[in-house]
Image: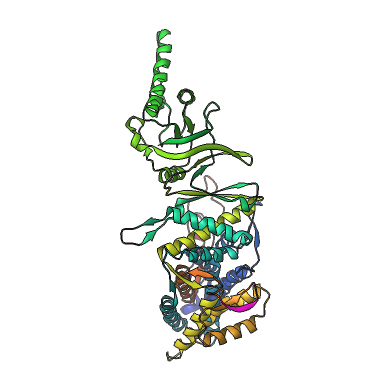
Amino acid sequence: MSTLPTQAGGVPVLVLKEGSDRSRGREAQHNNITAAKVVAESIRSSFGPKGMDKLLVDNFGDITVTSDGRTILDEMDIQHPAAKMLVEVAKTQDNEAGDGTTSAVIIAGELLGRAEELVDKNIHPTVIIDGYKKASEKALEILEKIALPFDLLNSKDFLKKSAITSMASKLVADHKEYLSDIVVKAMLEVMVKQPDGTCSVDVDDVKVEKKTGESLGDTKLINGIVLDKEIVHSGMLKRVENAKIMLIDASLENDKPEFDSKISIEDPSNISAFLKQEEDLLHNMVEKIFAVGANVVICQKGIDDMVQHFLVKKGISAIRRAKKSDMEKLARAIGGKIVSDINDVSCKDLGFAALVEERRIGDDKMTFIEGCKNPKAVTILIRGGIERLNNETERSIHDALCVVRDLIQDPKVVAGGGALEMELATALKKYAQTISGREQLAILVFAEAFESIAVILSENAGLDSIDILSELRSRHEKSEMWAGVDVNSGKIQDMAKIGVYEPITVKRQIIKSTYEAASLILKIDDVIASGKNNMPPSPPGGMPGGMGEYPGAGDY
């Protein structure tokens, strides 16, 4: 039971519910910062091209093997409220930029850890937060100045190099160049040029489908859509060339009444007439489809057995129960429209594909709609020998797609390998000298937090982090802006020359979200956790007003 200080007469004033927990001041700050540091520490070893993978087991015994920061934190089922804020940092980074989740959490943890050292020196948290704010604003300003803009149409190499950098730290690193080629081609295929000269692209326009079997080297880009469905009837053609495709989101069945209903037939001869009328309605549906020239039908809902029979007679192949998201991608891929009313269909609603074919992939049958002329939705079909490798490949490809999207929407890059972070740290240390007061110390530790990226890269590659950090500081002091850690050679290299690039969008979001998360946690000085009500319910027929029948009853 939590109390406030005793009042006159020595009687405690009860404020919080029994079982509540409360920590205040330095204790609360220490607990929150420690929890956040533990989260950052848990993914530290998975950072960089030489980072290790985590094997995560959930409550059902399913396992996940990954080095992706967000996936690790999602699977860890974290309970501490302050630690959950760092999970939110990873989610925000993933949603906004698609990559850099591990970096964001590591830097946020470093900012909090170094802030704790300042708090122990009696520097007030609000002073630290003000210093962090100035440092983050200056870091964003420097970032915009040193970023390298490029012409999207004439310098597509930057897209591939950035995608390779994104995949270099993942389980699929051995196939990073091949997969990066596929990712860049896919995104450029679905890219849309705007009237003002800019370009836009949506990651959702690239469908990622995976099937276990063969190897990652057999992953393919399909200029169209792959459906994890098969042709509904054995009598239908399994291969249709020059397909004219109708997309229907209504069911090809007779409408069933919403409520229970009965039909009374007094004359047995009327039964056949009733069945004939039902058959005619279904036949008319197929006639309307055939009349507009469609030879393939893809339906979001069900297709009646009788309709299937009539479609076979007309030589029309059909797929049923396609997902809504697949229907939308199909419409963009084949240039057709999704029809909601079969009575209002026209030939203008049809889409076109060079080939619609059912193929056996592994143990399953899939339908390929490919050879679309100008598809605004495409499919990457992942093949890998192990299901969990395919799952990690899907995550890696999603990150790479997001990186390419970032560059298409904002074509500016910075060098990776810790080069940018070291340049920001060097510039912030100089900037700190222009600030008087205790905020200067906060800016200095903000800079040191960014240096931790190069340190962790070195440690995970088995290099001497002290020597690496000393040499990097020296190089950046000499204006070698893009000097970073080449973990493959174990040396300091100009990362721009060896083609290690990252989008400015990723780094911009890291700076913003880490500052905000650190500030939010630092400003907390009181943690009040409500007690859980574990009392059993009152027995039936018990006396009203019994203890525990209403909140706080036991306090009186």
Q: Residue furthest front?
A: 154
Relative height, residue 5 to residue 257 (above, below): below
The N terminus, quarter of image: bottom right
- Which span of residues is magenta-colored? 488-494
Q: Position of residue 458 (x, y in %)?
A: 63, 76
Q: Position of residue 93 (x, y in %)?
A: 48, 65
Relative height, residue 405 to residue 261 (above, below): below
Q: How many marks?
A: 0
Q: Position of residue 137 (x, y in %)?
A: 41, 78
What's the colour scheme?
A: rainbow
> Is residue 59 at all visible to an observer of this figure?
no
In the image: residue 191, left or right of residue 227: left
Relative height, residue 432 to residue 521 (above, below): below
In the image: residue 386, left or right of residue 245: right
Q: Position of residue 110 (x, y in %)?
A: 55, 77
Q: Residue furthest left?
A: 195
Residue 489 colored in magenta in the image: yes
> Is residue 467 at all visible to an observer of this figure?
yes
* Camera-nearest residue between 113 and 259: 113
Residue 295 colored in magenta in the image: no
* Camera-nearest residue between 388 and 226: 226
Q: Residue furthest right?
A: 462
Q: Residue at x 47, y 41 (%)?
A: 323
